[in-house]
Image: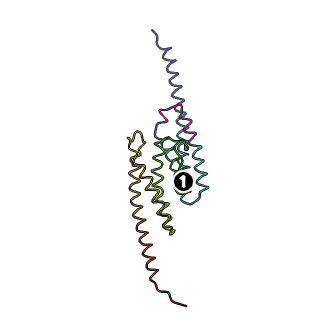
Amino acid sequence: MNREPELAVLAESVRHTLADAHAAREVALAACRSTIRACSNSIRAVHRRDDEGAAELADEAAIHLHRAQDALRPHPRLAGAGPLHDAEKEYAEARLTACLVGDDPLPSPTQLGVPCAAWLCGLAEAASELRRYLLDRLRDGEVARGEELLAAMDDAYGILITVDFPDAVTGGLRRATDALRAVLERTRGDLTTTVLQHRLQQSLDSRTPTTDA
């Protein structure tokens, strides 16, 4: 039996399917890169205390992320690959960082349109990102604000360590949580040193005699 006609039809169908997957992957990769870039810029804007700019950049990231998700939706195997997870995680990080800094309610994974694993990893990295913001506030003399930010970092860590599932399920959350723990302890030490110095300075100032003009 001559299989050539049959194989030709099947091969053409397979090539068409693979071509669609390849085209979707190229669209998604470009959109993921744009998402990550916009998220990075959004977080930098948060540190500059540019709330409006941070929100605009996060909105831009959402557009790129939705494009990537839409492109890969017909291709579940590709959707489960690294680039999309990374983009979703970075988007969650950008939104959660802004909310943690602004003392705003944290959006859920559903509200952000990302999987739970990406949301959790984003929360871990957002809490780590608070270290830089906290140190900036300490340099500005805002010790009380630094204590509030450390408490937020501690709260996030306390929740994340209760999520005990394999990395295949959580997308590498354990590694992100371990990194957060190290950042948290360094930050606690920095804040403690600053608080002690602040109290010492207040004590010295209170003992300095004043002279009447």
Residue at 58%, 54% (x, y): give it: 54
Residue that lies at the very extreme toward the bottom in this rendered image: 213
Residue 106: x, y in percent? Answer: 53, 50
Instruction: Tell me: residue 137, above or below residue 208.
Output: above
Q: Main secondary structure of the magenta part?
A: helix
Residue 150 spot, x, y in % from top left:
45, 60
Q: Residues within 10 Å of mark 1 (few under 14, many from 20)?
A: some
Q: Is residue 67 magenta?
A: yes
Residue 34 in picture, x, y percent from top left: 55, 45
Which residue is nearer to you in this view: 195 or 12? 195
The structure residue drawn at horizontal position 52% and vertical position 17%, both measured from the top left corner, is 9
Please give the count of numbered marks on the rendered protein: 1
Q: Amino acid at mark 1?
A: Cys
> Residues in magenta?
64-84
Instruction: Assign the C terminus to one quadrant of the image.
Output: bottom right
Q: Does 113 sit left or right of 188 as displayed?
A: right
Residue 88 is a magenta residue: no
Q: Residue at x 46, y 51 (%)?
A: 125
Q: Which residue is mark 1?
A: 99
Of 16 and 94, which appears nearest the observer? Answer: 94
Indicate the secondary structure of the residue bearing disc 1: helix
